[in-house]
Amino acid sequence: MKPIRLIIFDLDGTLVDTLEDIAHSVNFTLGRLGRPLLHLDTVRQYVGDGLEKLLSRALDGHTELLADAETIYTEHQRRYLVVNSRLYPGVVETLDHFRSLSMAVVTNKTLEFSEPLLDKLGIRHYFRTIIGADSGLPLKPAPDAFLTIIRGLAVQKERAVVVGDGTTDILAGRAAGITTCSVTYGFRSETELRLAGPDHVIHELSEMRQLFRAE
């Protein structure tokens, strides 16, 4: 098992299954703007790169509607952030197992929604740092957020790992020079993830316990 001191987690699709609530807000927004609604699997393919790209894709090129879409979506998410969203199996047990380590969340979701989501689902206290889309750093796949955490905690890169369900997590991790671990139960297919070249691929978060140990 690889000894580690820091785990950086993605949020949506890795710790929390937020797809239904995101899709609900997307389709509410599209309905208000007179645009066609989207199937859940279509929304699944659109998430992961931040709100602007999510809504731009959902609007199918109608960028003149983007500002209104962001306002409508944000207001809806504030009211319906945690309706069907839930932790994936094994999340609490895995976080508890690694509780002696430094753990962080880096997400392309804004902190306005990330922190309340973690609070309401009871896992906010596990994380020393949460960096979101509104933290002033470039979004993943840029490695800036990872490097900021590593420097701030004075952790050697070889003792850090990123865990996520997206190719952006793999690319950011590789650019930062840290170990990458992909989960297959989230928003991207295993085939897509493997093509991005992660160091590890797991099917349940609890499998981390067989790959890594606290240093």
Image (cartoon, rainbow, N blue to C red):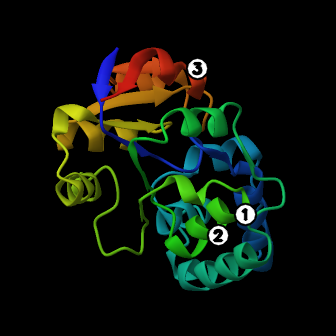
Residue type pointed to by label 2 = Pro
Relative to residue 30, is residue 54 depicted above or below?
above
- Is residue 188 something one can see in this rendering? yes
Badge 3 density bin: few <14, some 14–19, many ≥20, Cα 10 Å: few
Instruction: Answer with mark 3 or mark 1, whichever residue precedes in sequence.
Output: 1
Q: Which mark is residue 116?
A: 2
Q: Nearer the viewer, residue 189 or 106?
A: 106
Helix, strand or loop at label 1? It is helix
Along the line of sight, the residue nearer the viewer: 56 or 90 = 90
Residue marked by disc 1: 120
Which residue type carries mark 1? Lys
- Looking at the image, which residue is at 74% across and 53% down? 38
- Measuring from the top left, give residue 23's x and y in whole percent: 73, 57
- Dot 2 lies on which element? helix
Q: Which residue matches tag 3? A: 203
Asked whether the beta carbons under mark 1 and mark 2 sit within 8 Å of each other, the answer is: yes
Please indicate, yes or no, whether residue 202 appears anywhere in the rendered image: no
Q: Residue at x 29, y 24 (%)?
A: 3
